[in-house]
Amino acid sequence: MSVLTLNQIFKSYGKVQALKGVSFEVPRGSVFGILGPNGSGKTTLLSIILDVLNADGGAYSWFGQPGSKLQRRGIGSLLETPNFYHYLSAVNNLKITQSISGRGNEEQIMGVLKKVNLFERRNSRFSTYSLGMKQRLAIAGTLLGNPEVLVFDEPTNGLDPVGIAEIRDLIRELHEHGHTIIMASHLLDEVEKVCSHVAILKAGELITTGTVDEVLADETIVEVSAENMTALNEILSAFPDVKNQQWQEHQITLHFNKGEDPAENLNKFCFERGIVLKQLHTRKKKLEARFFELTNN
């Protein structure tokens, strides 16, 4: 079952089209990454599904019901930089958050602080927190009321490597505790490490969506050449498990699924058919290259 379904979402700011008919579904129990360069429409999309902005066209639904503010009770969200009172403690800041949002109760505050590993610093002023701690406190605020779905916009933005690792670990823990998580990011590495599913946006358009393994799968690439390139190209069309075959000027490039190592079998296959290879080179396509392909076509 999907927790969120988007159908042809459009949004413009004057002549600028921020979203151009975006449609996808977020499966229940997933960590769903919305990935794209800055300016691709990620924040606009999150703002629409959280009722902060109105779409110009299209529709979306939460838990099978048309999107509305009434559905927000089951959703915790963090769209902007944490905004707390610097002179108040974590506990008192969360009391204010609970009072304003109407989600949860004061008894839950200690529990969410434990979840984000801030219980020992619960009485410290917000001004004494590191950036990572401030972000974790903001996430604690989203957990009030125990929402099923959590929505984060660039949750590691501006953090140092230690802070990034802390937030990644926290997202994994929240997922293990049963939360469906939707997060926007421009960082491929972040999505690849924590997300199960991904939708890639470019200039407001949906490029592709699916599981991370399907969409961002790296590949094994084999480059071969022989004296008779025409004959080589013909016999390679019968070699099994080739995803893509490209004949360039002096070599033929074969693409295989991640984890495969066909070099030995490929060499034997060619030799048994009377072709002696002059070149046989195996390399891996990095995730960065795959992402570049998707967003620059």
Image (tube, rainbow, N blue to C red):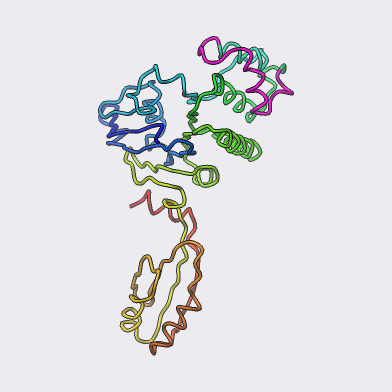
The residue at 35%/28% (across/down) is: 64
- Above or below 190: residue 274: below
- The residue lying toward the viewer, choosing from 225 and 169, is 169
**Magenta-colored span:** 99-122
Q: Which is more toward the observer, 287 or 179?
A: 179
Quadrant (top left, top right, bottom left, bottom right) of the N terminus: top left
Residue 164 x %, y %: 60, 38
Extreme-bottom residue of the structure: 274
Is 108 magenta? The answer is: yes
**51 up-or-down from 287: above or below:** above
* Residue at x 54% of width, y 19% of height: 145
Decide: is 140 above or below 241: above
| Relative horizontal placement of residue 204, taking residue 102 as reference (left or right) | left
- Above or below, 80 relative to 269: above
Q: Where is residue 171 in the image (x, y as percent from the top left)?
A: 57, 35
Task: Tally the numbered discs.
Answer: 0
Q: Residue at x 46, y 34 (%)?
A: 182
Residue 247, position in %: x, y? Answer: 33, 73
The reply, left or right, for residue 182 in relation to residue 66 is right
